[in-house]
Image (cartoon, rainbow, N blue to C red):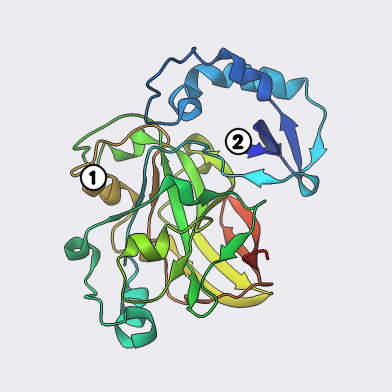
Amino acid sequence: MRLCQFGQNRLGIVSGGDVLEVTSALGALPPITYPLPIHDRLVAHLAELRPKIEAAARNAAPQPLAGVALKSPVANPGKIIAAPVNYRKHFEEVRADPQIHFNNRIAEIQRAGLFLKAPCSLIGPGDPVTIQQPERRTDHEIELVAVIGREGRDISREDAPGYVAGYTIGLDMTVRGPEERSLRKSLDTFTVVGPWLVTSDELGDPAALSLELTVNGKPRQKANTRDLIMGVPELIAFASSFYTLMPGDLLFTGTPEGVGPVVPGDLIRASIDRIGTMEVRVRGVPR
Ligand code: MN
């Protein structure tokens, strides 16, 4: 199943080049009271909702995907966990280029650990990335994103696949410079997720997916998840040794080599095998 969110709080199933609206299925979510849970309620209840979603899709009139504004397929991730340097060639690229590393200590993921991106930086491909500091270098980073499906702590590598609801594409937009990652990777619009969530049963094993990113049609990043230093199961085991994972948490698995700058007016096109392609506009701060 390919789940998308679009327009004003609308839920859809993607089928070929069309979206089938299934927003009515959200009416089956249990009522909520304050304080709100710190997880995504749709992902948490996806198994129960699935028959209702499928029934709604059967009755929906197809709308062309090209005509809808896609949002992040996970609306309310409690946290966004990210791997800093998780492809060997990107590690080498970062170490070799002072315009990327800025004398920050660069270590492999086992030593560098993980970082968090703020949920308030999240957008979908229907919204533009906004460059707030045009005098600074802002880079694209394409990443496979695993969406956590259920709560877990200290998850073993062997059990990890059972904790994944599905996969999507992420752009970990990054200002290069000496500041903490929070100040460079969590600006508004700097976490782009889309175009939809492909459930694990449909995607299968994420261990050998090709990724590709172009800017204005020119190739920038091209790699395969088989070159991840820590694959998805290892990352889930690693992350869950620090954080209790919750339904809807997003796990950015790290970017491969080929990172580079974008400027207002650019069009980023990001594709991952068995997921799809998303196009994202880059703009300056509107004046
Ligand atoms: Mn990244």
Is any part of residue 249 visible from this angle? yes
Q: Quadrant of the C terminus?
A: bottom right
- Residue 114 in which image quadrant: bottom left
Q: Is residue 217 above or below residue 226?
A: below
Indicate the secondary structure of the residue bearing disc 2.
strand
Q: CA distance from mark 2 to mark 1?
A: 26 Å
What percent of the width, then of the height, locates residue 216?
68, 74
Residues under numbered marks 2 and 1 in contact, where contact means CB atoms less than 8 Å apart: no
Indicate the secondary structure of the residue bearing disc 1.
helix
Horizontal side of residue 275 vs 223, given as left or right? right
User: As shown in the figure, which amino acid type bears the numbered disc 1?
Assistant: Ala
Q: Which residue corresponds to mark 1?
A: 237
Q: Residues within 10 Å of mark 2 (few under 14, many from 20)?
A: many
Comparing 259 with 133, the one in front is 133
Is any part of residue 97 visible from this angle? no
What percent of the width, then of the height, locates residue 100?
37, 80
Q: Which of the marked residues, 2 or 1, is nearer the chain's N terminus?
A: 2
Comparing 123 with 196, the one in front is 123
Label annotation for residue 3: 2
